[in-house]
Amino acid sequence: MEVTVLYFALLRDRAGSRQDTFSLSEGACIADLLALILDRRPALEQGLKSAVYAVNREFAGLKDMLHDGDEIAVFPPVSGGMGDQPVTIVRLTEEAFDLNDINRALVSDEVGAICLFTGVVRAETSRGGKSTTTELHYEAYREMALEKMEQVTLEIRSRWPEVKGIAILHRLGDFEPGTPTVVTACSASHRDTGVFEAARYGIDRIKQIVPIWKQERGPDGEIWVEGGYIPGEEDRNG
């Protein structure tokens, strides 16, 4: 059988390629695939020790079986159909946000509170010493990122059932300091219904399970920023 492997962020840089195709025996699992990846891309040895794997845009473990035609994504830890449910907005975009439009979209006759978190590019970062960022680059495994953003909205609704509307938006591309790049917003009838906690939960989960990475660029060069969270069984959708 044949499978396609996609590399993202730092692992793509180290591999020197965006994707590979591998032939495997029937019954092979991700662990078997890793041996082939290392044989072809030895520069990935260190990165694969902490890598996250997804099969057909769902998180997977080393023992998960593979099938002909599978698409396997290999990436560093993330840095991120509602029926008659109220409005849900999930979007990856290169365009600037209009925060007023987001607020308007979450308003209904029952809404009396909207909590909106906006993440902005920092010019200075303290990470083992102060560093200067002149530009921040965001990229994503787009299809899976959108699915995981949808998953975050479902998790919010299960934990805070009084939340009426949810918006999760993330920009992709290159951005200067001071630029808003991510928004999580929740609306409800009143401020005491969980909107603060729900919006905070949304951004925290983006950083854990949504495959979006950032590269800081500055006078001293470029660095991919990786998180330390490795998704597990509980992070799979459904």
Image: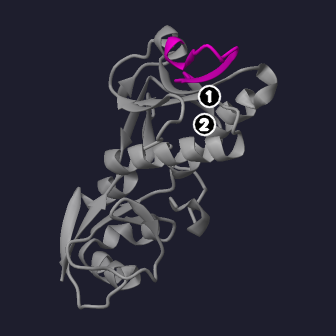
| 152 is higher (above) or lower (below) than 238 | above
**Residue lying furthest front:** 84
Q: Residue 14: give x, y in percent of width and height.
A: 32, 58
Observer-nearest residue: 90 or 162?
162
Q: Are there few (<14), some (14-19), or many (20+) residues within 10 Å of tag 2?
A: many
Q: Which residue is drawn at 46% across and 11% down?
A: 101
Helix, strand or loop status at disc 2? helix
Left or right of residue 37, residue 220 in this image: right
Q: Residue 105: give x, y in percent of width and height.
A: 49, 17
Q: Residue 70: give x, y in percent of width and height.
A: 26, 71
- Region of the chain picked out in magenta, as a range: 104-123
Asked if marks 2 and 1 touch (Cβ < 8 Å), the reply is no
Label 2 sits on what residue type? Answer: Ile
Observer-nearest residue: 5 or 38?
5
Residue 115 part of the magenta segment: yes
- According to the picture, the residue beneath numbered tag 2 turns out to be 203
Quarter containing the N terminus: bottom left
Residue 157 lies in what quarter of the image?
top right
Q: Which is more N-terminal, label 1 or label 2?
A: 1
Residue 7 lies in what quarter of the image?
bottom left
The dot on residue 172 is: none
Label 1 sits on what residue type? Answer: Lys
Residue 28 lies in what quarter of the image?
bottom left
Q: Are there few (<14), some (14-19), or many (20+) residues within 10 Å of tag 1?
A: many
Residue 193, visible in the rendered structure? yes
Q: Which residue is drawn at 34% across and 53% down?
A: 8
| 53 is higher (above) or lower (below) than 209 | below
- Please name the colour scheme applied to the rendered image: one colour
- According to the picture, the residue beneath numbered tag 1 turns out to be 164
Nearer the observer, disc 2 or disc 1?
Answer: 1
Helix, strand or loop status at disc 1? loop
